[in-house]
C-alpha cells in the first residue's frame, strides 16, 4: 500500500484546486480530501492521474466520481463529526473514506457484488471502518439503523426515493442527483417536519444510474 510524498504533494495541489477553482470552503472536506489516498481506490494504470479532476472506470461498469463532485456533495451535506451518515452507493469506497475522514459514523450500501467486495477489502486495508457496510438495494435505505442525520446518494435516481427521506432525522439533509441517465440535477433536501422538506438545486451533473435490486 504505497502512499508516497509524491502522492501527498499531488493531493495538496488537488486541494488547492478545489479551494480556489471549485470554491470548496468547508475545511473539514478539504482536510479529508488531503488525507484520503485516491490512487489506492483506482486501477494502477490510472495512478499517475489520480489527483486530476477526472472520473475513472472501476469494477462493474461503474465510475469513481470526479474529486470536485465528491468535494461538492460532501460540502453540501454539511457533515459534523459524530453524525450518522447513510451513503447509497459505496462504489470503490473513496467517498466512504472521505466521509470517515470527516469523522462521520458511516452506514453504506452497495448493490454491485464486485464493488461491495472490493470496497470492503480496500477500506479494511486502510484501517477505515464504517459502522455498517452492506450489499443490498439502496432504494430501501437501512431502516434498521434509521434515523440518519445525513444521507448522500452517489448515483443518479430517475425518481426521488421517498423511503430514504423517511429515514432522515428532523433537521437532517439528503444530497441526491435526480433526473434522466444522461444528465441529473444535484438536489439537497432538508427535513423540516415529519413530512415537510425544503428543496435546493445545485446544477447539472452526470452520475451512474441508481439501480434497484442487487447484482450478484
Image (cartoon, grey):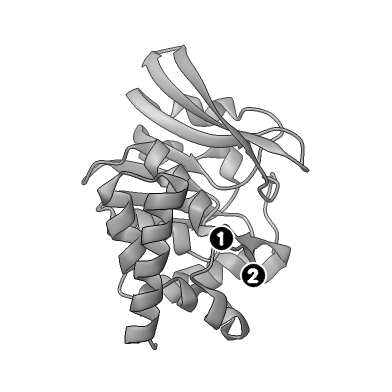
Q: Taking the image as drawn, is residue 3 in sight?
A: no
* Quadrant assignment for the N terminus: bottom left
**Could you say where residue 190 lies in the image, as x and y percent from the top left?**
41, 22
Task: Report the front residue among 32 and 18.
Answer: 18
Q: Residue at x 71, y 33 (%)?
A: 158
Mark 1 element type: loop
Q: Residue at x 51, y 31 (%)?
A: 164
Disc 2: CA contacts within 10 A as few (<14), some (14-19) or many (>=20): some
Which residue is denoted by mark 2 in the rendering? 58
Q: Taking the image as drawn, is residue 17 in sight?
A: yes
Above or below, comparing residue 3 to residue 156 in the picture: below
Mark 2 element type: loop
Q: Are marks 2 and 1 in contact (CB under 8 Å)?
A: yes
Task: Report the front residue among 104 and 144.
Answer: 104
**Could you say where residue 146 lies in the image, as x and y percent from the top left?**
37, 35
Q: Residue at x 42, y 64 (%)?
A: 14
Q: Earlier in the sequence, mark 2 or mark 1?
A: 2
**Could you say where residue 24 lies in the image, as x and y percent from the top left?**
38, 46
Amino acid at each position: 500500500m504505497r502512499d508516497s510524498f509524491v502522492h501527498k504533494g499531488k493531493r495538496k495541489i488537488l486541494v488547492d484546486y478545489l479551494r480556489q477553482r471549485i470554491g470548496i470552503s468547508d475545511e473539514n472536506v478539504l482536510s479529508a480530501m488531503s488525507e484520503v489516498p485516491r490512487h489506492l481506490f483506482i486501477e494502477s494504470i490510472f495512478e499517475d492521474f489520480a489527483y486530476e479532476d477526472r472520473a475513472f472506470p472501476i469494477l462493474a461498469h461503474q465510475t469513481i466520481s470526479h474529486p470536485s463532485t465528491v468535494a461538492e456533495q460532501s460540502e453540501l451535506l454539511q457533515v459534523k463529526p459524530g453524525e450518522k451518515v447513510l451513503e447509497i452507493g459505496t462504489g470503490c469506497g473513496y467517498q466512504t473514506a472521505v466521509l470517515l475522514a470527516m469523522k462521520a459514523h458511516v452506514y453504506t450500501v452497495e448493490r454491485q457484488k464486485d464493488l461491495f467486495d472490493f470496497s470492503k477489502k480496500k477500506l479494511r486495508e486502510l484501517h477505515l471502518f464504517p459502522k455498517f457496510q452492506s450489499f443490498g438495494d439502496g432504494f430501501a435505505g437501512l431502516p434498521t439503523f434509521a434515523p440518519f442525520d445525513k444521507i448522500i446518494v452517489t448515483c443518479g435516481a430517475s425518481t426521488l426515493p421517498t423511503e430514504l427521506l423517511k429515514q432522515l432525522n428532523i433537521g437532517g439533509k439528503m444530497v441526491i442527483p435526480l433526473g434522466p441517465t444522461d444528465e441529473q440535477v444535484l438536489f439537497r433536501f432538508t427535513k423540516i417536519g415529519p413530512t415537510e422538506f425544503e428543496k435546493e438545486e445545485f446544477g447539472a451533473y452526470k452520475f451512474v444510474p441508481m439501480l434497484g435490486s442487487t447484482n450478484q
